[in-house]
Amino acid sequence: MSANANLVASIEALLAAAKGYNIDAPDHVARVNMLGQLEALHYQLEDPTEAMFRQLTNYSETSAVRTLRQMNVLEKIPREGSIDSKQLAADTGKNEEVLTRLIRVLTSTGILKALGGDVYAHTSRSLAFLDTAEVEFWDLCVDEIAPIAYKMPEYVATHESDSIFNPRQSPFSWGNDAEGKTFYEFLLDHPDRLKRFNTAMTTQESALPVLGMFPFTSLLKADADPSRAFIVDVAGGRGQSLLQIKQEIEAAGGDMGRGKVILQDRKAVLDAVPDEQIPGVEKMDIDFFQSQPVKSKSHSYLFFRDLFSTTGPKRLSVTNGTISNNDPTRILAFSAASYVTGDLLTHYHPDAQIYYLRRIMHNWQDAECRKILQIIAGAMAPDSRLLIGEMVVPDVPEGVDKTVYWMDLCMLIIGGKERSEKEFSALLDSAGLKLVKIWRNKLGSQTVIECHLK
Ligand SMILES: C[S@@+](CC[C@H](N)C(=O)[O-])C[C@H]1O[C@@H](n2cnc3c(N)ncnc32)[C@H](O)[C@@H]1O
C-alpha cells in the first residue's frame, strides 16, 4: 500500500470507530483504542524534525504546570468563567509577565484556554491538577525523579556501566549525595520525603488498579481457620490495597473467610497510619529482607532457632502453642528467661492464605527480589498463594498506555526494574515459586501474577 493509501485507510478506520462510539455512554476500552489510532495517525503525518522539537514541549509543559501550582495560580483561575492576567497577578501577588509566559506554554498545548486579550480559562485538563488525588504522585515524580532523569547523561558519564544495577549506587542515590544508601534507606533518613512518598503511593488507582483482575472473593472459605491470616499485604504502605480488597469482599457479603488481615511495612511507615484509617487490619512491622513472621506451622521452628542461633537448641518445634525440644535443659533456660509465654509466642503466627506483594518487585534488582521472594516462599504453606501486583512489560509496545515505560525509567533511576512475563517467570522459578497465571487488566500493563510454591 502506498503511504497515501495508508494514511487514508488509517483515517477511515478511525472514522468507522468514531461512528460506532457512543459519547454519552463512553466505553473506556473503545475510547483508548481510538486514541491509539489517532496517535498512529499523528506519527504518519508528523515530520521527524518537527517531532524532535515537539519532545521539548514535555519538559516545558511540565515545568510550567509545576511552577504555576507552586505559585497557587491555578486555584485563582475561576472554575467557571475566566480571568485576565492583570487580575491574576493582583490576586496571586506574582509578576504579570512571568505568569503570562508560563500560562502561554499551557494554552499552546490545550491545558488552559486562551480567550484573547490575555484572558484565560480552565479546561478539564487544568482542573485535573486541582481535583484529582493522582496529582500527588505527579508532583512526586516531577520533584524527586525528573531532576535526576535530566542528570542521567552526567551519571552515565561518571559511573561504570553496571553500577546502575547496584541499588546503593543508583542515579537517585548519586543525585542526592547518598551513594551507599538504597532509595528506601534514604527515605527513612528523610521523614518529610518519606511521608510525601507514602501519601503519593495511595493515589495511583486509575493507572495501576488493585481490583478487577484477580478474583479475591473466590478464595473465601466458610470453614477457614480463623487464626490463619486471609491476606498479608507485604510492604503494603498505608494499607491502600488492603482497604480496597476488603471493601470488594465485604460488598460481596464475605468477611475475608474469617481470617486476619495483616498490613506489613517498615515501622516508620506503619506508625504514620492511624488505626482508624484501616479498621480490622492488624499492623506488623517487618524488614522483608530479614524475615516473614506470618509463617506456616511446619516452618515455625526455624523462627525459634533463628532467635537462639548462637546458644539455642539444635531443634525446636511448636505444636499448638507447646514448645518441645530434644534438650530439656535448654527448654528450662528458655522458660526461665520468660520468652516462652512472652515475646516469642506473641510473635508466632500461622501462615497466610494470600501473601500479597504490590509494587515491590519493580523497586529492586533481581538479587534483592529473589531474597524477598525466597523469604516469603519459606513462610508459605502448600496451599498459600503469592499474588504479585505489578505491571508486565509487553513483548511489543501496544496501545497508548505508556505507564510501564515511563515507570521503568523511574525504576532505573531508583534502582529497580519493570519486568516482562519471561523475566518474572525466571525470577520466581529461581526463588522456589511457580508462576501459575497472569491476571491482566482490560487495559494497560497492570496485572496480578498468581504464584504457588514449586
Ligand atoms: C512502592 S511502595 C508500595 C506500597 C504498596 N504495596 C502499594 O502498592 O502502594 C514500596 C513499599 O515498600 C516498603 N519497603 C521498602 N523497604 C522495605 C523493607 N526492607 N521491608 C519492608 N517494607 C519495605 C516501603 O516502605 C513502601 O511502603
Image (cartoon, grey):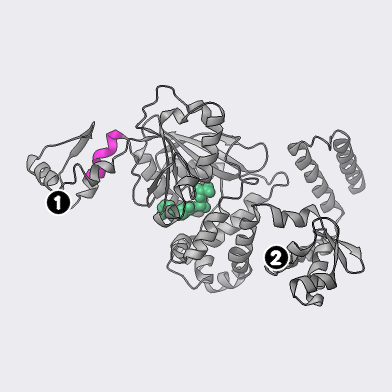
Q: Earlier in the sequence, mark 2 or mark 1?
A: 2
The boundaries of the magenta stretch are 297-304
Does the magenta-highlighted stretch encompass residue 89?
no
Q: Which amino acid does label 1 sit on?
A: Thr
Which residue matches tag 2? Answer: 69
The residue lying toward the viewer, choosing from 317 and 241, is 241
Left or right relative to 225: residue 272? right
Q: Quadrant of the C terminus?
A: top left
Image vertical order of residue 276 relative to residue 30, above or below:
below
Mark 2 crowd level (few <14, some 14–19, many ≥20, 10 Å Cα): some
Q: What residue type is labelled 2?
A: Arg
Left or right relative to 370: residue 118? right
For image coordinates 46% across by 50% down, the residue present is 274
Q: Give how far across and how far down residue 444 sits, in percent.
A: 66, 43
Q: Does the residue labelled 2 lie within 8 Å of ligand 1?
A: no
Which residue matches tag 1? Answer: 311
Image vertical order of residue 209 relative to residue 83, above or below:
above
Q: Can residue 366 be seen in this view?
A: yes
For image coordinates 9% across by 40% down, the residue present is 327
Left or right relative to 222: residue 151? right
Q: Quadrant of the N terminus?
A: top right
Q: Can residue 365 be seen in this view?
A: no
Residue sitting at the far top: 223
Which quarter of the figure has residue 59? Answer: bottom right
Mark 1 crowd level (few <14, some 14–19, many ≥20, 10 Å Cα): few
Q: Main secondary structure of the magenta part?
A: helix
Q: Give how far across and how far down residue 133 sits, in percent.
A: 64, 52
Does the magenta-highlighted stretch encompass residue 300?
yes
Q: Does the residue labelled 1 lie within 8 Å of ligand 1?
A: no
Closer mark to the observer between disc 2 and disc 1: 2
